[in-house]
Image (cartoon, grey):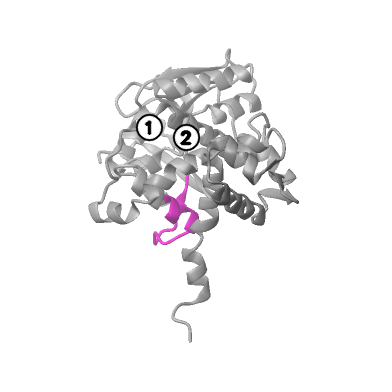
Amino acid sequence: MTCEPPDLIQLTRGFREARIVLSGLELGVFDSLLKGGTTAREFAASRDLDPRAAEILLDALASLGVLSKAKDHYTIAPRHLPALDPDSPRCVVPSLMHTLNLWRRWADLTEVVRRGHPLPTEGRTVSETEHFIGAMRVGARQRASALAARLDLKGVKTLLDLGGGPGSYAIAFAKQKPDLKATVFDLMAVADIAARHVAEEDLSDRVGTLAGNYLSDPVGGPYDLVWMSSIVHMHTPEQNRMLIRKAAQALKRGGRIIVRDFLLDEDGAGPASAAIFAVNMLVATEGGRSYKASEIRGWMKDAGITRVEVQTLDDDGLVIGRKGSSGRQRQP
């Protein structure tokens, strides 16, 4: 007789594969193998590791299909090579590095639930910021162009990408609509990264950056469209109500706000992608979480945004609203 369903046992052991891959990343396995195959002993010597332990880790990576093993030599499995090569357009290493940073926060989940807020940290380092913004860029790699093609951009000539991170969406919108000019608003260190990516796409004449803290600084305008992707999940309801109001004030009459984010079902218990991401915000922010479409709709209506519609995507969704002709705002 078993005490627990086998699927529950397997669920609690899901961390093992993740930790193996992340330790391989942290120990430089993939960097070493980009230069060619190596033995466990050679790899251990190059990284000052215990040979036995190194062999066990490399064999585990091979068992997961991340590495290939022929006799005593290990190489990166061909299907994973583009994802692990920094020079490849399909590289996901920044996202893996961000996951490695998150691992440490998730380890504190039990205590975070007791306290109701993350444990104190020294804040993001420069490299962690690069990893975070790089992870955002990886996540938006295909999604941004698909959404730019999906959305109706007729009449949109000025766009604000609020908290735009790497600038992926502003770049995609500019590519989709040649007469559109976009502004990426984010913190100074992030805006500098976005400007670099914009320059790489040769779009600096149409996509600019504006540095500041969107919770306290002016965001410019007026704009035809304010795009808010992966922003509301970082903040409290009160902060989001203020942000939506600020975005509405930055819009031209008849302009639109589009919020893209994980959207919880109305009972809050799903889908799993949104519910689990809420936990990620619990361990990483003071007041963030995933929200229901009805909550975002309410913030928009309070800010004078009308004709609000919700579009469900694969693992997230869009909440789209238009600024009324009168520009009036309801009081919270």
Looking at numbered disc 1 in the image, what kind of residue is underneath it?
Arg
Q: Which of 8 and 299 is in front in this view?
A: 8
- On residue 124, the disc is 1
Q: Is residue 283 something one can see in this rendering?
A: yes
Task: Tell me the crowding category of disc 2: few under 14, some 14 to 19, or many 20 or more residues within 10 angstroms, Cα based.
Answer: many
Q: Is residue 137 above or below residue 18?
A: above
- On residue 238, the disc is none
- On residue 132, the disc is 2
Q: Dot 1: what SS?
A: loop
Q: Where is residue 143 in the image (x, y as percent from the top left)?
A: 60, 39
Looking at numbered disc 2 in the image, what kind of residue is underneath it?
Phe
Which badge, 2 or 1, comes first in the chain's sequence? Answer: 1
The outermost residue toward the top is: 205
Q: Which of 79 and 72 is in front in this view?
A: 72
Report if the CB atoms under discs 2 and 1 are less than 8 Å apart.
yes
Q: Which residue is drawn at 49% across and 54% down?
A: 273
In the image, 21: left or right of 119?
right
In the image, 141: left or right of 281?
right
Q: Dot 2: what SS?
A: helix
Image: magenta residue range: 260-277
